[in-house]
Amino acid sequence: MSGRGDVRKFLTLRPLSLSLRSLLIVPFVIQLVLAIALTGYLSVRSGELAVNQVAQDLRTEITTHIVDQLRAYLAEPHQINQLNVRAIAQGNLPLGDWEATEQYFLQQLQDFKYVDSIYYGSVSGEFSGALRQPEGAHPLQVMHVRSQTPQLLQFWEVNEAGTPTRLVTEAPNFEVTQRPWFQEAVAQGQPSWGNIFTYHAFPAMAIPAMTPVFNAQGALQGVVANNFFLSQVSDFLKTLKIGQTGQAFILDRQGLLVASSSLPQPFWVKHGKAERMLASEAPTAVLQAAVAAMQRQDSDLVRQGAAQTVGFTADRAHYFLQVTAFQDDYGLDWLIGVILPDTDFLGPLYAYRSNIILLSIGALLISLMVGFYTSRWIAGPVQYLRRAARRLAAGNFHQRLPQSGIQELDDLTLSFEGMAQQLQTSFETLQQQALHDGLTQLPSRNALVTEMQRRLVRAEQDVDFQFAVFFIDLDNFKLINDSLGHLVGDRLLVEVAQRFRAALPYPAFVSRFGGDEFVVMTGAVAAIDEALDLADRLLQIMQAPVAIGDRDIYVTMSVGIVFSTMQLNSVEECLRKADIALYKAKERGKARYEVFVQEMHATVEQRWQIETALRQSLEAQQLAIAYQPVTQLSSGDMIGFEALCRWHHPQLGPVSPEIFIPIAEETGLIVALERWLLHQACAQMQHWQQQFPALPLAFMSVNISPVHVMHPTFVADIHQVLQATHLAPAALKLEVTESLMMHNPGVARERLQQVRAFGVQLSLDDFGTGYSSLSYLHQFPFNTLKIDQSFVHQLRATPHDTGIVRAIIAMAHSLNIQTIAEGIETADEAALLAQLGSHYGQGYYFARPGSADDMTRRLTAAAQRSSDRSSQ
């Protein structure tokens, strides 16, 4: 009975019941909690993503700023050395008058703010310089070692007039030629940096910039150098705003500190003397941990110049470190580190997350008290906030959320809107930087792509809307950049951008595509002629020279044009076709425009095929040289040769120099090609001179491109070839065209004078067909003029051309310049040119270009004839 009663009691139990209020409030509370939690998560998550991106961009921006400032600091020391070497060569800095030298250096210290000491040491052990102390009442001093006091370095305080007034200190056993900076400069043989060192006289750290000084005979005179106090770099780093508590540092590849924003000084001071500091031993835990993180990280990318970001923990805080390699043209190899704690950016976000949690708890308590009506009242604003978070994550910052009348939710709404406004401001700043070029302030490539896509869509929808795209490239900009420096090149780009803005008002869209390339998009154009008129206006913009400092730089541009009517399906296709038209404009002579037509595709593909084949042939040494004799017209003897580059490709067959030489110039391959050509031709000439000593073989002519002349290694290339082949410098004749003298004639003249100083001969090729100017003959050290074959072929046809040739020869004689007539094909032409006084001639009448073996047979026959005449 007892068991049966328990079963009956169990079956009669009432089911669990809830009050109506609980039934209404509990589901509402659950929904409210979920909604607020989801809203908070989405907002915080999207905020984290946005903040992380902002932090990354800030690290990159700070690194870029540091790199730019470093280049500004470190460019000045070598510029000063170049000025002083030039001053010594020109006699403006008289070595031997050491007091005048010290005054000269003192004046330079006041003119250049980044350099702290300038000095010169001679091979005889004398030393003279000027110094700017990093601190003190008398910052300027002179320092010297005199022949009367050998190896005794004295520091003198000077007055405002630069006169030494008080001996500050002396350093004995200062042997100039044994100093590290002197020996390193002599070992390098060119401008370079020395090792960072610390001063003995006062706690400071500096890096020397050295340049050896040679006399006209190439003998070492001494070393001119200057020291750059690295405290300036640390001072600059300390001025940077790196988040709230971030820091930056620079170290070399040995792990020694160069500069730091967090240390009073990036070196130790022990017993009054400064010593280099290992970054791993720095007196800050954050810096030590950062270096340890770098050592654990694979550094291949850093060595290649790419930035790396690593995370590490120090003092129970998490940090991000961005490491970027820094190199320059003089051998520097440093690492730049930017450290940012994540709390600088994520701290406000964490606080905001706490606010969300607190507000959620408050809303939950209110919902329990108010009940069902309150739950309905809250549901609407929560849904608004949820949708706003999603729109915020999608990039929609312009949102106004309605007020609910509930304080907690209204506070949450205001906090959310405040965060959205802050993120909007940050993204607008980043977008401004992304869509505008930092140098010219023109719209960037990203902005161009967006605008071009918009116009393509409009053109597709509106058949009456047409526009044109102009792809612009500055002609010979690389020559200007290489010869005058990147700073001048940058100022030139800024001036060009300003001219574009002034000449092309809205609705024309002007942007910088990259490097020296610009893209202009017109507004609606009614006819093609309207766009071509604009192209003419673009070309006229650059007719006036660009004044940069005391220079007037003439620069032209080539323009490729494509119209929206050319079935442009994408931005990429539009830019590609405009680029093809630009290439055609350059191919046809530059300083002009070309409109894209479909037939240009095949031409460009052929050009790319030739360029690829030329690179492969140059690496495989598949090029050949043909030699054409140069004959002395008075005697008929072979006097020299001209080396002509020839190319027979296995698939393409023989390729004309008129085709592959311009391509080599455009791609920069011409420098390597001419190095090879010079070496082969000079070696062959030296061999012939030894093999045929009885023949009057005087010179080997080699054509040199203007691109090679303006290349920084040109003078060194010539010197290296002469040393390697043992050819006498006078036996090498370099032929240049008149176009070289049209762009940067000052730099061209300096380079040619340097090789002329070796004893190398210079010839002006194709005289009379280009930009001939008598002033060039006076300014440039030419030995020979080559009379173009177009005049030679018309000698018998018109007295006018005969008069021109006679005038050229007479003018050359008066300037003590020899002449070579090209393209002689008949005996009459040879006789007439000899009668007119031309020294030499070449052409098919004497011999066609041939291989080295062909010329060896000719020389053998000539030597035999000479021997026969001698025996008679």
Image (cartoon, helix red, strand yellow):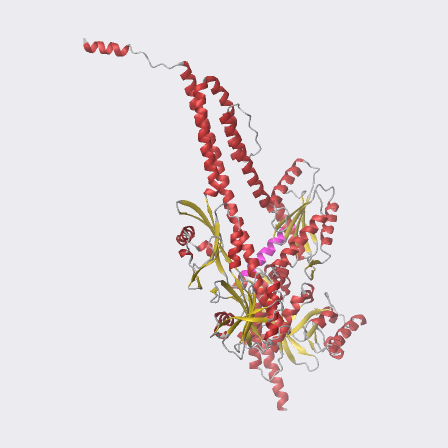
Give how far across and how far down residue 215 sits, in percent.
59, 76
Q: Which residues are magenta?
A: 599-615
Image quadrant containing the N terminus? top left
Q: Residue furthest left?
A: 1
Q: Residue at x 54, y 57 (%)?
A: 70
Q: Looking at the magenta stretch, what is its main secondary structure? A: helix
Image quadrant containing the C terminus? bottom right
Q: Closest to the observer: 519 or 827?
A: 519
Question: Can residue 644 be spotted in the picture?
Answer: no
Q: Closest to the observer: 405 or 621?
A: 405
Q: Is residue 15 left or right of residue 338?
A: left
Does the magenta segment cover residue 619? no
Question: Can residue 603 be spotted in the picture?
Answer: yes
Give how far across and how far down residue 69 sits, in percent.
56, 55
Location of residue 77 by image quarter: bottom right
Instruction: Answer above or below: position of 522 versus 273.
Output: above
Q: Is residue 434 left or right of residue 552?
A: left
Q: Residue at x 52, y 46 (%)?
A: 58
Give how far across and how far down residue 64 sits, in percent.
54, 52
